[in-house]
Amino acid sequence: MNISEILFYFLSAMALGSAIMVVVSKNAVHSVLWLIITFFAISGHYILMNAQFLGIVNLIVYAGAIMVLFLFVIMLMNLNADTEPKKNRWLKMAGIVAGGCLLLVLVAALKNAEIRGQQAQFNEGNIGLIQNLGEVLFTEYVVPFEISSILFLSAMVGAVVIGKRGD
Amino acid sequence: MMHLLAMDWGFVVEKMILIISIVSISLVIAMYETYAERKVAAIIQDRRGPNRAGPFGLFQPLADGLKLFMKEEIIPNTSNKMLFVLGPCLAMLTAMMTSAVIPWGDRIHFTLFGQDRYVSLQIADINIGILYIFGVVSMGVYGIMIGGWASNNKFSLLAAMRGASQVISYELPMGLSLIALLMMTGSLKMSVIMGQQLDGWYNVLYQPLGFFIFLVCAFAECNRTPFDLPEAENELNFGYHQEYSSMKLGFYLFAEYINMFISSAVMVTLFWGGYDIPFVNDTELVKNIGYNWMALLQGGTMFIKVALFIFLFMWVRWTIPRFRYDQLMNLGWKGLIPLALLNMVITAAVVLWLKK
Amino acid sequence: MVERKPMTWVERLYMWNIMKGMWITFRHIFKKKATISYPEQKRPFSPVFRGLQILNRDEEGRENCTACGLCAVACPAEAITMEGAERKKGEEHLYREEKYAAKYEINMLRCIFCGLCEEACPKDAIYLSETFAPSNYQRKGFIYGKDDLLIPHPKTNPVEYKKALGNRANKPQHEQQ
């Protein structure tokens, strides 16, 4: 048991526990806050794998920006435990069936996956460092990178169009 | 378990001492910022300011702190108690965390058990220093949001919304203005950016527009006037900390002052040469007076530069009235972001041209 | 009707106006402070300042008041009450004339400091001093009796007497009327 392993188990427990709390919490605002903790734990994992850039970008983009907007909307909607509508029983059954199917698919997919031979890299490997990441991103993966940026741009234009419709 | 013991314990102890001292120094500075704020406000308005507690009123912050601690702590009945307490804690935590990557001086040298030890006066020189600052700053908005929501009060909620949208909006031009800087420095490490300015050519000379955008955004991120819309006292009745009392209120106010201190330190490090003593050849001086005296001088220089920025923050606060909300958003999205993009493109072109 | 012109491009940058404002506030740093540090430093009183009342004595320390009641009649706020008494043998060093005020009370909560009592007094026994802003924990503390109002004795306590007399003592008699 070295420090990285202790940290790994701690972060995993944190991520799983808070992820469960996201689903279980009755209050939507609490769910968002638990989700933020999950992001923190995942960023911790990234940093353990020496992928500092990914870790911090995960924090800035997801925990720092997207979740703030989520929180924003949820706070404005003023959702309480009492305002939650009663769900149809058939809907619940459908949810259980769908979840079970997902579990089956996951088990089937992971059954043959090779895990034993692969060792996760702790605190080594430089692929996650910002310099290497930048080089790979702008040489090997430059086309997907630019395409994804065009996708974002079109999404933004779409948002502006929707927002402008009022006047 | 042997792995745990095989660590360099001296290193851990050094870092702990460094962390504790930097945290306590920033707390003391934040304390005296409240005093300075009142003094600056007073002299700008032809008054004297606090001058009763101690010589020149220097014990005023202690008295203020004592007052805040002694006050009755009121938690509204309808609020969400856990989050209500979490809000100021988060605000304080995120305010303190940024100081970890700022280089406060070069290094200290001492001999322990016959070993030469050099202690860098930077808590963590991580690869992604600037991004770390951004990450922590973007967390800072949660203190406001959670506190404002948990107060269960319309004004607090409105203020929290304002704060959140303001901070998110101004993070973008801030980041864009820094990208131009990073194109020049080629590194995200604070120590490298700092080291490049040791020759006296500060980054602000190359990036005046970038610095200006960063400065405006820093005002907005610290929720200082003219961008103090989250706590607008005449329209939102003190905004997100309306329901807070006692030291929980004190934490919010304190966090603002620590933020001010830290953002001044970041600006100094990135644009104004950090701890570099102007018009002095540092490498020559080190040979003459040794590392420890040098560290002291550098710390003093840093402190003076930071103090000048803090004065600027206060000077602006007591001069400029608050922006209206639509003006704030216009300035951020239609003014600063295009300006920052322009700055980025120009810098990129110049950097490419120089490389050729 | 306020005319709102659309701002020009330079105005919309706000920079020029902000600089101007900053320069103005910066100049104020070096201006003289308008504050007077109160307990150490006091503003000079105007010659017609009207503070708390004082019951006067003459140079030998005898009370001037004869309990004629003119001040009480003149008082628009009806703040003054008094009871007269006859001077006994052997009290000549205490009271200047045959009649004196055994009880003399001013309710400072009612008093409006108009100074009519001073003007009404034929014996120069009451005047408004330069003391002001009394404070107390209870309302009854504001009903000033004779021991609160009487000026200190000029023989036994000349320093306090001078202080209580204030600047008015220096003024010639005809100006006081």
Image (cartoon, coloured by chain):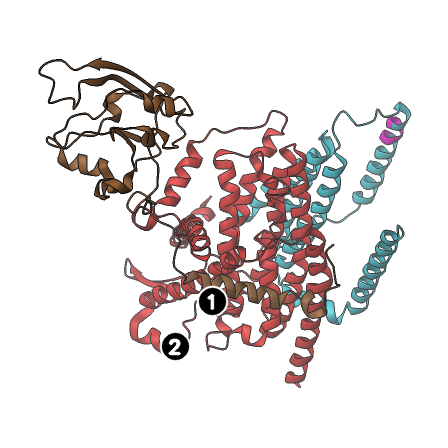
Chain colours: A cyan, B red, C brown
Name the residue located 70 percent from the left edge and 38 percent from the top edge: A19
Q: Is residue A1 visible?
A: no
Q: Which residues are magenta?
A: A92-96
Residue B331: horizontal and vertical position, in percent? 69, 60
Q: Quadrant of residue B305?
A: bottom left
Name the residue beneath numbered marker 1. Answer: B274
Q: Is residue B317 magenta?
A: no
Quadrant of the image containing the C terminus of chain B: bottom right
How far apart are the alpha carbons under marks 1 and 2?
Answer: 14 Å
Name the residue beneath numbered marker 2. Answer: B280
Residue that lies at the very extreme toward the left in this rendered image: C90
Number of marks in picture: 2
Name the residue located 25 percent from the left edge and 31 percent from the top edge: C124
Letter of the chain that mark 2 sits on in the rendering: B
Q: Is residue A95 magenta?
A: yes
Of residue A107 and residue C67, the one placed in the foreground of this image is C67
When the figure is inspected, residue B47 is found, relative to residue C169, above or below; the finding is below
Q: Quadrant of residue C49?
A: top left
Q: Quadrant of residue A94?
A: top right
Taking the image as shown, residue B125 lies to the left or right of residue B171, namely left
Label of residue B153 in the image: none
Dot 1 falls on a residue whose secondary structure is loop
Dot 1, how many residues are within 10 Å of its Cα: few (below 14), some (14-19), or many (20+)?
Answer: many
Dot 2, how many residues are within 10 Å of its Cα: few (below 14), some (14-19), or many (20+)?
Answer: few
